[in-house]
């Protein structure tokens, strides 16, 4: 059985490097033009995206370029130029959402494979066959597709690769088909500028048409007013069933606009889960403990294992976001010699070290601090906080942008964290 590919979001060059360092086989991202994440796309220029592609290729990894917006007629010439420019960067595939753009890309850049975006909402064999005949190599299935339907598509089209989302934010509508953001903010979801209006806290009112009186309705205790707010997808406990099916070629993590810590922890955890499955040592509890350290809206296993109409636990009516079980205190630099503060660190406090799998760490005890192992985990305790330019502090806060020297070099892009309430 060929090992499924693990695909992570790359919202900028740093997140690209983090995701690959933490175990992703490939990443996806793009510049702002015609990409469905304008906010993340603005983090990349053509030059920095090319740098990311080269970085990935040097490590035997892949980069897929997102060109999955829905263009207007007035933009078609711009789109042609964009496809040509992106093809020159030599990504490993284009992710595209519409049949017209698929055909255009095949004409302008026939050497670049095409992956069909989840925005195309492919749910069945008929639609999959149409796009396969157009030259699509891989389909990113609609989040509403069931595993049994994915198996049927694979039986019918064995050469067509299938990719599914396994983690990240969920749309309360068919992906990208919601217009609430467009109506309320003029920001169109399927053109990359969704304002996430489904996460807002709404109030209910009734109006009497006879006298114009407006009255606010009070919600039932514990129900709340986040009426559109979907929980986050989390399939780490179902990877064994998914991978055993033989139908799924790639597992995709959502979240180009999420944090560096999210990019690292999701890649690391799903890397562990995939490798454990093939090594026959799968342990879902271990993966959930790590994923619970992330900020989330509560977790759901979505629709791959159950039909949408069978689900009653996919919404979070309480809050649009909640803290995870851990607080990130610091991010280690790419050179490994310094950290940048993300939350208060004081002299004498110990912070847990989280790093890419298979990393090597030397335990030390010197004038700057101590790096040590306890109960199978690594920790760092600072005896002094020495800034890069030499100043010493007793404590440092997230607003201080100066880098701080570590007691000894650590793996690039490692994180220091502490348990909330621990």
Image (cartoon, rainbow, N blue to C red):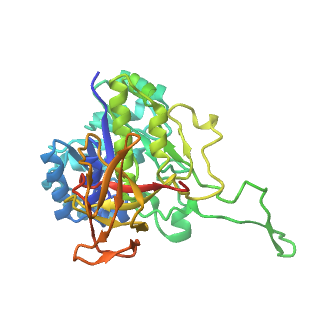
Task: Say if 362 sits above or below 235 in the image.
Answer: below
Residue at image location 57% in from the left, 33% down from the top = 307
Q: Is residue 174 above or below residue 71?
A: above
Going 32% across and 74% down the picture, which residue do you hit?
401
Q: Which one is nearer the viewer's eye here, 126 or 382? A: 382
Residue 61 lies, in percent from the top left, at 20, 43
| 207 lies above or below 107 | below
User: Which of the pair 154/405 is nearer the observer?
Assistant: 405
Total numbered labels placed on residues in the image: 0
Which image quadrant for residue 319? bottom right
Left or right of residue 231: residue 269: left
Q: Nearest the camera: 364 or 211?
A: 364
Whole-percent x, y for residue 94 in the image? 25, 48
Quick one: quadrant of the N terminus?
Answer: top left
Which residue sits at x=27%, y=73%?
387
Q: Position of residue 58 (x, y in %)?
A: 12, 47
Q: State the image coordinates of residue 89 (x, y, percent, origin top left).
A: 15, 55
User: What is the quadrant of residue 335 in the picture?
Assistant: bottom left
Residue 247's place in the image compared with 396, above or below, is above
Can residue 72 be seen at all in this image of the molecule? no
Residue 348 visible to the viewer: yes
- Looking at this rendering, what residue extends furthest in the right direction? 210
């Amino acid at each position: 059985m060929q090992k499924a590919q693990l695909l992570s979001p790359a919202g900028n060059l740093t997140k690209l490097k983090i995701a690959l360092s933490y175990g992703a086989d490939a990443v996806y991202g793009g510049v702002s033009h015609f990409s469905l994440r304008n906010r993340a796309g603005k983090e990349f220029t053509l030059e920095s995206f090319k740098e990311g592609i080269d970085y990935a290729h040097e490590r035997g990894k892949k980069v897929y370029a997102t060109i999955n917006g829905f263009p207007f007629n007035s933009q078609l010439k711009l789109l042609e130029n964009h496809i040509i420019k992106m093809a020159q960067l030599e990504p490993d595939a284009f992710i595209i959402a519409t049949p017209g753009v698929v055909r255009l890309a095949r004409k302008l850049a026939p050497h670049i494979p095409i992956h069909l975006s989840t925005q195309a909402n492919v749910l069945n064999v008929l639609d999959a066959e149409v796009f396969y005949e157009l030259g699509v190599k891989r389909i990113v299935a609609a989040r509403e597709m069931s595993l049994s339907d994915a198996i049927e598509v694979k039986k019918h089209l064995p050469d067509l690769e299938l990719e599914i989302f396994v983690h990240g934010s969920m749309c309360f509508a068919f992906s990208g088909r919601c217009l609430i953001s467009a109506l309320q903010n003029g920001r169109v979801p399927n053109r990359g500028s969704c304002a996430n209006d489904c996460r807002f806290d709404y109030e209910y009112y009734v109006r009497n048409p006879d006298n114009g009186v407006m009255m606010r309705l009070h919600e039932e205790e514990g129900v709340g007013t986040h009426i559109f707010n979907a929980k986050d997808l989390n399939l780490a406990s179902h990877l064994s069933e998914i991978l055993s099916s033989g139908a799924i070629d790639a597992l995709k993590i959502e979240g180009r606009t999420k944090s560096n810590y999210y990019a690292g922890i999701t890649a690391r955890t799903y890397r562990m889960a995939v490798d454990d499955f093939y090594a026959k040592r799968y342990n879902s509890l271990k993966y959930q403990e790590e994923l619970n350290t992330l900020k989330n809206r509560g977790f759901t296993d979505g629709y791959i294992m159950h039909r949408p109409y069978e689900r009653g636990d996919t919404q979070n009516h309480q809050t649009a976001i909640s803290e995870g079980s851990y607080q990130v205190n610091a991010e280690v630099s790419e050179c490994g010699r310094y950290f940048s503060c993300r939350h208060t660190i004081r002299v004498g406090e110990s912070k847990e070290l989280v790093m890419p799998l298979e990393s090597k760490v030397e335990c030390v005890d010197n004038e700057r601090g101590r790096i040590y192992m306890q109960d199978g985990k690594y920790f760092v305790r600072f005896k002094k906080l020495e800034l890069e330019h030499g100043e010493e502090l007793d404590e440092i806060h997230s607003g201080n942008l100066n880098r701080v020297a570590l007691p000894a070099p650590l793996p690039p892009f490692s994180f220091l964290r502490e348990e909330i309430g621990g």
